[in-house]
């Protein structure tokens, strides 16, 4: 059995999702680096769960604009204040549904349980509803349980030139400059 599957089945899968959401919150809201936030968020997790939380966190940042657009379209209004961590948990769930080789039911279940771990027990229904809605509207998964993320295109004005920037797959690296530019100019927050 692979380490990832052991992690999901051992009951700690939700803890790795909660740790990933907490680390993303620290990175995107507080300005910490992921390499500093992740060890703190995963300090009490077994090694397999640390690796899963790391893979999820780096993966979410790699395709952040696409995930923000998917999740933001399902929310009536942005999650703010103490609920902002739920936004990052929803990004974690969406990343698993679209980009990781994790079964849909396991991804949704562990992410919903992570809401309880984060102290948002009353919002488990919100997390479940949005992830299930994303799942219903998502393209069919391929044999490896992955789905294609929608393409997001922006035009960035740089030194007087229009430059199209397309973000498509989870394997496409996003440098800090490009992520920041997309966030500011395209409104993917």
Image (cartoon, grey):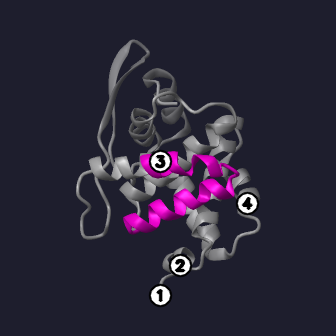
In the rendered image, residue 159 lying in the magenta stretch gets the answer no
Measured in 3D between alpha carbons, the distance from the residue under mark 3 to the one under mark 2, in whole angstroms, is 26 Å
Q: Pointer 3 and pointer 4: residues touching (CB < 8 Å)? A: no
- To which residue does mark 4 refer? 39
* Residue extent of the magenta highlight: 102-129
Measured in 3D between alpha carbons, the distance from the residue under mark 3 to the one under mark 4, in whole angstroms, is 19 Å
Measured in 3D between alpha carbons, the distance from the residue under mark 1 to the one under mark 2, in whole angstroms, is 10 Å
Instruction: Choose the circle earlier in sequence order: 1 or 2.
Output: 1
Q: Pointer 4 and pointer 2: residues touching (CB < 8 Å)? A: no
For the point 69% across and 75% down, the residue is 46
On screen, residue 155 above or below 35? above
Q: Residue 9, which numbered label?
A: 2
In the rendered image, residue 113 lying in the magenta stretch gets the answer yes
Quarter of image, res 12: bottom right
Instruction: Choose the circle earlier in sequence order: 3 or 1.
Output: 1
Which-is-in-front pick, marks 1 and 4?
Answer: 1
Crowd class of label 4 (few under 14; some 14 to 19; many from 20; radius 10 Å):
some
Crowd class of label 2 (few under 14; some 14 to 19; many from 20; radius 10 Å):
few
- To which residue does mark 1 refer? 1
Measured in 3D between alpha carbons, the distance from the residue under mark 3 to the one under mark 1, in whole angstroms, is 27 Å
- Tell me residue 135's x, y (percent): 33, 53
Which-is-in-front pick, marks 4 and 2?
Answer: 2
- Tell me residue 19's x, y (percent): 66, 58
On screen, residue 72 above or below 138? above
Secondary structure at badge 2 equals helix
On screen, residue 54 above or below 128? below
Q: Pointer 1 and pointer 4: residues touching (CB < 8 Å)? A: no
Which-is-in-front pick, marks 3 and 2?
Answer: 2
- To which residue does mark 3 refer? 62
């Amino acid at each position: 059995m692979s380490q990832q599957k052991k992690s999901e089945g051992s009951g700690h899968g939700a803890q790795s999702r909660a740790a990933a959401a907490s680390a993303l919150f620290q990175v995107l809201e507080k300005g910490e680096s992921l390499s500093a936030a992740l060890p703190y968020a995963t300090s009490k997790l077994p090694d397999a769960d640390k690796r899963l939380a790391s893979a999820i966190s780096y993966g979410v940042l790699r395709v952040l604009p696409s995930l923000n657009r998917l999740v933001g379209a399902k929310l009536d209004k942005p999650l703010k204040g103490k609920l902002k961590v739920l936004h990052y948990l929803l990004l974690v769930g969406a990343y698993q549904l679209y980009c990781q080789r994790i079964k849909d039911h396991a991804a949704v279940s562990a992410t919903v349980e992570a809401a309880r771990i984060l102290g948002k027990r009353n919002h488990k229904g919100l997390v479940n509803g949005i992830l299930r809605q994303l799942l219903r509207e998502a393209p069919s998964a391929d044999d490896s349980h992955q789905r294609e993320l929608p393409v997001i295109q922006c035009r960035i004005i740089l030194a007087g030139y229009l430059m199209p920037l397309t973000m498509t797959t989870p394997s496409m690296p996003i440098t800090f400059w490009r992520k920041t530019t997309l966030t500011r100019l395209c409104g993917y927050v």
